[in-house]
Amino acid sequence: MTTISYETFPTERLKNFVQAVFEYQDFSSQHAQTCADVLVSADARGIDSHGVARLSGYVRLIEKGRINPKPQMQFSQNKKAVAQLNADGAIGLVSAPLAMQRAIDITQDLGSGWCGIHHSNHFGIAGYHALMAVQHDFIGIAMTNASPLVSPARGKERMLGTNPIAVAIPAGEEEPFVLDMATSAAANGKLEIAQRHGKNIPEGWVINADGSSSKDPLALKDGGMLLGLGSDTDHGYHKGYGLGAWVDIFSGVLNGGSFGPWAPPFVTFLDPVANQPGQGLGHFVGCWDPAAFRDISEFKSNMDLWIRRFRETTPIDPHRPVLVPGDPERLLEQERIHTGIPIVNVVVNDLEQLGKKLGLQL
Amino acid sequence: MTTISYETFPTERLKNFVQAVFEYQDFSSQHAQTCADVLVSADARGIDSHGVARLSGYVRLIEKGRINPKPQMQFSQNKKAVAQLNADGAIGLVSAPLAMQRAIDITQDLGSGWCGIHHSNHFGIAGYHALMAVQHDFIGIAMTNASPLVSPARGKERMLGTNPIAVAIPAGEEEPFVLDMATSAAANGKLEIAQRHGKNIPEGWVINADGSSSKDPLALKDGGMLLGLGSDTDHGYHKGYGLGAWVDIFSGVLNGGSFGPWAPPFVTFLDPVANQPGQGLGHFVGCWDPAAFRDISEFKSNMDLWIRRFRETTPIDPHRPVLVPGDPERLLEQERIHTGIPIVNVVVNDLEQLGKKLGLQL
């Protein structure tokens, strides 16, 4: 257990550093800028596990040749509502926004549009990509598979990633509804926080390698597994498993990416297993235009009504009002634009070392 | 606590009875047949809470004028990939298959197609509608909102239904993947089973009216609420809430159906609250053609690989192998085709009374 402290950084300073790091790694300025925007938006929204804390991990993947800094990404399309992007080994931080833009273009025309992505890599927070659609008054959805860490119900083997689903829905006067969730009971980042604080974790987050229950935040590193949302048989673990499986199939199997236990790991000390059934990670993005379903102004006023009514739900504790999905992240983001982003000391050290190695100022 | 016994009925006998009941209620033969097919398929698949146990509930809704036996259902469409069905007060058992057929037709052409439904009623098991797509080698998805019984995270008010999501994905030689899940930690039917057996339920399924935890299967009837998947703060209750909210918005708000606490209740002893923000229940169905994403034979062989590999996951208990979503329901269905469908005595009595009232032989 180390002492925990935070250093606060203005958003722009972090973005500039991240962009410089990717440019140093031979990314185009445009790609490096997109990477910086996606990563720092995770920190701004409080999803620290998917922000700059991942930067040196991405760099290691680039250095090892597992992320292609100069991808020749190519779309193919044989049906009007669906496209497919071969990301040519790109980082998902750039392939997913490109694919989402294509889905948006299709939706402008048809009312709904889809793009699968294969031969890609980790794409950051799913919510970033889903929210792109909201700028066009569309509903956006984004999914990705990821390094296998989660065991299916009844199993004791790492078969699925924390496989997130994000759905972003525009409203009228209210801010958008943004569901952005891992399909595991707890994301890896929560284990790291418990570990830093030297605390136990609740039962139902991880199991040991032998399948027994554990409260140790290190159990995962010791060969254990994360559990799916629901955590155990009585509480619907088969549903969390089913959701994670859905995301894996839509990301990998549907697009020609790898999947299940074969999904390439994020960490470079593990090589992807041999005989991959697909290329790289896969993602799945798409949109619906609410105006294709009903009058858009009626849709928006009913979304406002929905949001306001749910915020007014009678709370169990009057000091903890009911929130709408997306509220916590947006409130943090609005605050951090002004106050800056607190970065925990271990991550600051990591970024400083990376900067020193590459001759870049944090 | 009453004595529990079962009577076993051949599938056809149940279907004929259900069809006769709906025909007696002035449904067309075609609609009555569809209703019988959807309802009895729930019993065959082991989802007893959504099968013939609901029949007299539907009849009461028809008798009260809340379900229209002779609906003039009408499609509208202003974008190529999306249609909208005004169900004119139809039972969802017939409006949802009609809408799914439209989504399938659009998908034949564009690679993906969608249909919203409003002014509808309870649609039975979501999996039935999603599985319609699989007959065309498409992926199907179906959602519906429902009677408000579930409290949002932090709340103590009935704001959401058990709002199911079903996703059905075709494979090659293997049977399809079918995720069909309520977004609550436990469905209402599980409370009824515990109640019949005079047993407590696990913590994390329901809370009392004051928001306190309960193990009493009667807590819901006493003014309590069901909890979302995840059950509590530590185990990701906000995710189950987010999933249920997503389904509510896609079913109600997007299509012009009612939503949230206003969603019309299934039971007839409760009237829909005044000043409804939309018409009836809403549903959301659609499809994707895997052949629009990649070569269909490669997709199918990778789906087979996915299914086989997941079944081979190292199990915690060697006597309880890892299953693929859809396995338990399909295995029951295959068995019950031959052995018949066991119906619990309270439901048999209910059906017999209904038959007597209408002059129909069970």
Image: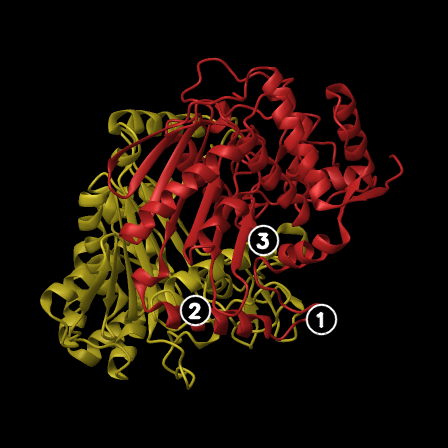
Chain colours: A yellow, B red
Q: Distance of mark 2 from mark 1, alpha carbons?
A: 30 Å
Q: Return the chain for callout 1.
A: B
Tag on residue B317?
Answer: 1
Count neighbours of disc 2 (C-alpha within 10 A) and say few if under 14, some if 14 to 19, many if 20 or more. many
Which of marks 1 and 2 precedes in the sequence? 2
Tag on residue B300?
Answer: 2
A331 up-or-down from A141: above or below: above
Q: Amino acid at mark 1?
A: Asp
Location of residue A126 (image quadrant): bottom left
- A159 relative to B359 in the view: left or right: left
Quadrant containing the N terminus of chain B is top right
Residue B215 pos. (x, y %): 74, 40
Pair 2/1: label in front: 2
Q: Secondary structure at mark 3?
A: loop
Q: Return the chain for callout 2.
A: B
Count neighbours of disc 3 (C-alpha within 10 A) and say few if under 14, some if 14 to 19, many if 20 or more. many
Same chain check for tags 3 and 2: no
Residue at the bottom extreme of this rendering: A274
Residue A163 pos. (x, y %): 43, 61
Q: Distance of mark 3 from mark 1, alpha carbons?
A: 19 Å
The residue under the point 70% across, 33% down is: B17
Residue A28 pos. (x, y %): 11, 70
A192 up-or-down from B213: above or below: below
Location of residue A162 (image quadrant): bottom left
Residue B286 pos. (x, y %): 39, 45
The residue under the point 15% across, 78% down is: A359
**Residue that label 3 marks:** A230
Same chain check for tags 2 and 1: yes
On the question of residue A83 being in view, the answer is yes
Q: Nearer the viewer, residue A145 or A28?
A: A145
Location of residue A218 (image quadrant): bottom right
Pair 3/1: label in front: 1
